[in-house]
Amino acid sequence: MKMKELEKETGVGRETIRFYIREGLLHEPDRPKRNVARYDQGHVERLKLIRRLQTERFLPLSVIKTIVSAQDARPQRGIEQLIGLENLLGPLVADPRNLEPRRFAEVRDSTGLSEEELRRLVEVGFLHVDEYDGEEWLNSRNARLVELVAQGRREGFTPEVGYEVDTYGIYAELTDVLARRAVVTFYESVGDRLDQEEAAQLAARGIRLLDEIMPLLRIEKIVREIKRLSDEGKLPEGYKPDR
């Protein structure tokens, strides 16, 4: 179909369609001639999906692009029915102490970490800040992370011995990889087999299992690595810790 027909079929204007193509949300049309573009049903379905995600889920284009890219990579595993799963999952994995979010400035002042250090923790992906009504907030998990960094400093993990806030970036990087792999595996496995409520319950159980598995596995790996270095008597060639 031509651009005019695509506009009529979807209710999306041509400038918006062209923008979506430039941004990678919509695939390029077939171009049999230099000034001729042919659109197909795939364009119609994608545009309707984008509109639905915007109007029903209120998702920003950056998130929508991630979703449609995942569909392109795994067309056999649609995830549309699980979009918004986080809304059901959140209460299931909430801190049992029912801690409230705290203002960024309040956490900064109570822990003794500087503004610069907290901003750096955000930059390295260790900390996430939410904004509401023009104010910065930390949810209970992020507030606790700051408290633990401050506790570590009191217990001797200080900049003087090489533990700058940047050191925590490696944990953020590793957790990012783990989280992405875990989520993708979950979505690929669940696919269209479960509805949102069933998927949320299963995901919550999986998170609780990982909460027990990961500390045990981490301690086991660290102890074995320390033993390996003791046996070898030296650090690996080219090893240089970030400081």
Image (cartoon, helix red, strand yellow):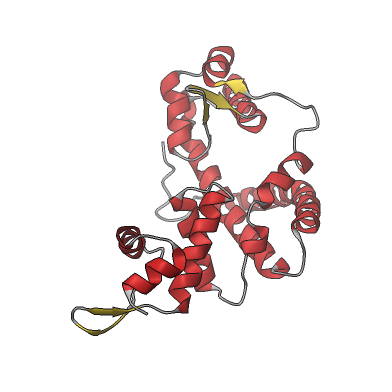
Residue 92 image-quadrant placement? top right
Quadrant housing residue 78: bottom right
Q: Name above or below for residue 199 compared with residue 59.
A: below
Residue at horizontal 77 percent and vertical 65 percent from the top = 194
The percent coordinates of residue 187 (x first, y second) are 66, 64
* Above or below 78: residue 178: above
Q: In this view, does 211 lie to the left or right of 111?
A: right
Q: Residue at x 51, y 24 (%)?
A: 158
Instruction: For the N terminus, give its image quadrant.
Output: bottom left
Is residue 43 something one can see in this rendering? yes
Q: State the image coordinates of residue 2 (x, y, percent, origin top left).
A: 33, 77
Up-down relation of residue 69 to residue 96 (above or below):
below
Residue 70 image offset from top left, x and y in percent: 52, 66
Residue at (37, 64) in percent of width and height:
24
Q: Nearer the viewer, residue 27 or 232?
A: 27
View extreme (left): residue: 34
Judge by depth and name the residue closer to the eye, 142 or 67: 67
Side of 114 where 103 appears, left or right: right
Q: Quadrant of the C terminus?
A: top left
- Looking at the picture, tell me which residue is in the foreground, 5 or 156: 5
Question: Relative to residue 130, is residue 213 depicted above or below?
Answer: below
Whether residue 233 is visible, yes or no, is: no
**Left or right: 18, with 99 as reference point:** left
Q: Where is residue 131 in the image (x, y as percent from the top left)?
A: 51, 28
